[in-house]
Image (tube, rainbow, N blue to C red):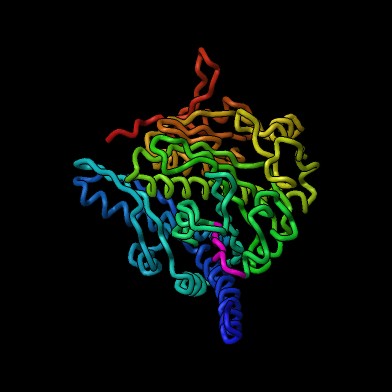
Amino acid sequence: MRSPAFLPILLTLVAVLAVAAPARAQIANDRGLFAVADVVADITADSAAHARDQAIVAAQRSALEQVLERLGADPSLAHKADDDTVASLVENFEVDGEHSSAVRYIGIYTVQFRPGAVRQWLAAKNVAFKESTHRPILVLPVFVGGDHPVLWEQPTRWRTTWENAEADAGSVPIVVPSGGLGDIALLGTNDAMGGNAGPLKALIDKYKANGTAVAVLASDPAQPGATLKINVYLYDENGAGIGKAISLSLAGAADSDTVDAALAGAVRTVRQAIESDWLQAGAQEADQDNGQNAAPATYDAGDNNPAGNGPPAPDDTGVGGAAQNSAAQAGAPTDLQVTVPTATPADWQAIKLKLDRVPSIEHANIVAMTRGATSIDLAFHGPVVQLQGVLAAQQLSLTQDALSGGWILQSAVGPAL
């Protein structure tokens, strides 16, 4: 039995954790707005070394353009500034992946800008901007590998990988709760799996978050060759389920030495899917507030909903029926299930960047990612022929297989160096 003298110490530690965790969330909220991940630069020069130097400059400028767009400022300012000015705004620059030949270099970067420096630079140019920052999303990593799901009870590789992920590497910052006594008292594993609004809201309020994502890994990552089956359920700031479940089947580890790398790749993919759905949900909510969205989609919380009163899981095709039904409404986008040949995650990132530049595309959500291919749900406005023409301008080819009828999206220019 603990001595009475131990109790004040225990209570003090709990109080410190309760204060520190939301503070970390606020830092991630501020810095996440000025961090840009998955910036791809593809440069050809007289040598690989010169191409790499030019790629770094191009990546920083491209990242600054994205930050300016987030701030509501003129993104063309990124191209009007000289190289030294852009570099002076950068706080941290990381190479996430690279590949080169004798004269060509392709790099994938994460760029963190200095918030104060960017603000001062814009103020000096008398440029108006608005910091509509995103509050962080709580991520609750649940592992279902034995006879019961695990959230807090014991450390898991799934949870550790999320804890090690960059909190502010994306457009929407994430926070993984510390899992201390205060967290456990507010929300249990069954509450997370069941989508119980009250406990979810209590934890969301504690971390001053904008909502939460329950990320459920339902396969053993330590088993070589096993597919990582992941379902993600999103809940708003009140703990109410939003949207449909995100269902992913990702390539697992080839052997015991690559488990951590496979999980890290899975976290990056899941995070991208969460951000895409979260930002899309925010845009739809804004449309509804402005009276532009006649009727939101409805969901059947029946037996196909493993998260209780949360969003339903997808059907066998990985696409929820509600989304397909809503496409039939007037003014709704057309949905295509599209296969994207991808040798590496970087291939998909490069194509996704081009898709994001097409105004008629509403979303391109990952349905499944396996070795050699990424399956996406592509929603767009207008006829397919028009979309094909716009994609051609982005050096992308959208074609329909004559035998299977399936749609294939790939680079019009081959990725080989």
Tell me where residue 288 appears, x and y as whole percent.
77, 49
Q: Is residue 393 above or below residue 40?
A: above
Between 48 and 303, the residue placed more toward the observer is 303
Q: Residue furthest bottom?
A: 5
Q: Is residue 391 above or below residue 311?
A: above
* The stretch drawn in magenta includes residue 63: no
* The stretch drawn in magenta includes residue 173: yes
Tell me where residue 53 appears, x and y as whole percent.
26, 55
Tell me where residue 150 appears, x and y as whole percent.
57, 52
Q: Is residue 336 above or below residue 270?
A: above
Which quarter of the figure has residue 73?
bottom right
At 67% from the left and 34% from the top, the residue drawn is 320
Tell me where residue 289 appears, x and y as whole percent.
77, 53
Magenta stretch? Answer: 172-181
At 21% from the left and 42% from the top, the residue drawn is 103
- Asked whether, in this view, residue 213 is left or right of residue 309, the answer is left
- Asked whether, in this view, residue 319 is left or right of residue 366, the answer is right
